[in-house]
Image: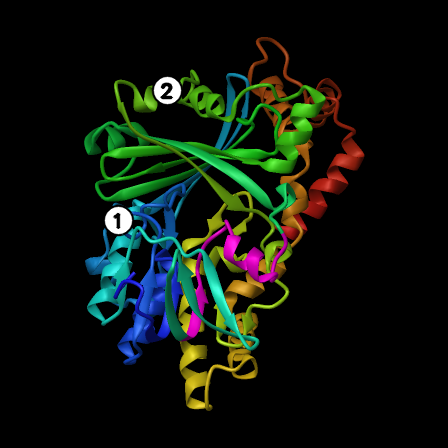
Amino acid sequence: MPGGSTPQKFDVIVVGAGPAGSAAAYLLAKKGFKVLVIERGRGAGSKELYGGRVYAAPLREVWPELDKEAPIHRWVRKERISVVNGETVATIEYTASKPVSFTAYLPELAGWMAKKAEEAGALLVDEVRVDEIIVENGKIVGVRSGDDRVYADVVIDAEGANRLLLEKLGMVERASPENLAVGVKEVIKIGGKNIEERFGLEPGEGLAWVLVGVTSGAPGGGFIYTFKDTVSLGVVVHLRGAIKAIESGAFTDHVYKLVEGLRIHPYFRKLWADGDIVEYGAHLTIEGGLSFMPKKLVAPGFVIIGDAAGLLLNTGYTIRGVDFAVYSGKLAAEAVEEAFNKGGPTEENLKVYEEKLRDSFVYKELVKHRGIEKVMKDPDFFTKYPAMLTLTLGKLFEGEYEEPTILEALLSSAREAGVPLLSSLLKLLWVVRRL
C-alpha cells in the first residue's frame, strides 16, 4: 500500500481494476478527484477471464477513442448457433450488416482501461489484497490490507463475482450455486490466415459461436470466438444444475473434460487442427443477475458496481458482461460527483446511482430477460431438445428412398428423445417470450 502503514486519504478508493473499476476511476480522475485503484492481481486484468466478446457502444460513452486505441482483435460480423447431439451438429448462421461487438483478450483490454485511468490521474497499486472495508460510526471510510489502512470519502466495490468484502459487511449472503456458473476455456493458436480460411471470414472479421449440447447433460453451453491468430473455445456449466446432474449420475466427467471433448469433437476439431494450446483457464461467473444483485447498491460512502452488483446477462445466445460493468462504472462516477456537489457522499446522496442504474439499458435488459435463468437450469434444454432437433433434421435429410413430412419427423423424433410434444411446445413458447 502507498506510504506503508501511514494512513493516507483519497477522495475515492476503487477496489478492483477490472472494466467496472477502471471506468469509474478514469471518469472520476478526469474530473479532478484523487483516486486510488487497488488490484489484487499482478497488473490490471490479470485475474479476469471470459469468452472473448465485448459490445462496443457502452464503452464508447466512456472512451470515445475506443475504436482507434483499444487492443481490439476482430470485429464480430458472423454469428453462429449450433445444436450438438453426439457427432450430429445443426447450425444456423447470421452475417451482420455492421459489427456491434469485438473480440479482445480481457487482460489486454482491462490493462488498456486501467492505463487510461492512470493517464487521467488515478493511482493504481496491484498485487494488493483488500482484506476489509473500514466502517466507522456507520459510514464506510476506507479499506484495510493487512496492517495498512487507507482512507477515502467514498469506496467503490468492483471486486467481481467473489464478493468476500460484501459478505464481511453483511450486505450479501454467501454466494449460492443457484447463482453461479463455472466457465472453462482453452485458447488455441492457429494463425490469422487459417482462422479466416477455416471459419469463412474476411481479414479483420470475427465470429461468435454459441453451442448447445456440449455439457454432457448438465445445464450450460459452449462458445467459440476468433481472435487475431487464436481461437477461444470453452464451456460454461451452471453449478446447481451440475450438482444435480452429478447426484443423478447423468454427469460424471470433470468439467475440464468437457472442453477437451469440444476440442476433439469430429465436427469441430478440423477448425483448429495442428494448433497449439497457449492458454487454459477457469473462472466463476454469475447467473441470474437480478437474483444475484444486492438489496442495496449504496451505503454511506459506498457504491457497488460490475459483477459484484450482479450486472451480467446471459440470454443463452449472447452474454453481456464487460459492457454492463463499464456502464455501471460510468453511472457510479456520475453519482459520486453529484453526491459531492450536493454536500457529501451520504447514502441519500449516493442513491442517485441506483436511480441511474434502474433508468439505464443495463437494468432494463436484466428485467426484460429475468426469466431466462429458469431455462438455464432446465436440463431438458441441454439434452432432450438438442436430441429432438437433430433427430428431426436427420429424418428429413437422410432419407434414402422415402422422406417423412415435417410433422411426422417431429413426432417421431419427440418420441425417441422422450419429449412430450405439446408440453414442450408450450415450454418453448414461454422461453421465446423470455428471450
Disc number placed over residue 269 in the picture, else none:
2
Residue type, mark 1 in image: Glu
Measured along the vertical axis of the image, is residue 398 above or below residue 425?
above
Q: Nearer the viewer, residue 241 or 39?
A: 39
Span highlighted in magenta in the image: 153-173
Q: Is residue 32 left or right of residue 380?
A: left
Residue 412 coordinates in the image, percent (x, y): 73, 20
Query: Whole-percent x and y of residue 292?
Result: 60, 54
Say which of marks 1 and 2 sits in front: 1
Q: Is residue 115 visible?
A: yes
Task: Specify whether 173 is left or right of 424.
Answer: left
SS at mark 2?
Answer: helix
Q: Where is residue 192 shown, x and y percent of the image?
A: 21, 34
Is 109 rendered above or below residue 33?
above
**On residue 310, which mark appears?**
none
Looking at the image, which residue is at 48% across and 31% down? 91
- Count of labels in the image: 2
In percent of the image, x 59 and y 13: which residue is there?
A: 399
Asked if labels 2 and 1 touch by Cβ distance under 8 angstroms, the answer is: no
Separation (CA) of disc 1 from disc 2 = 27 Å
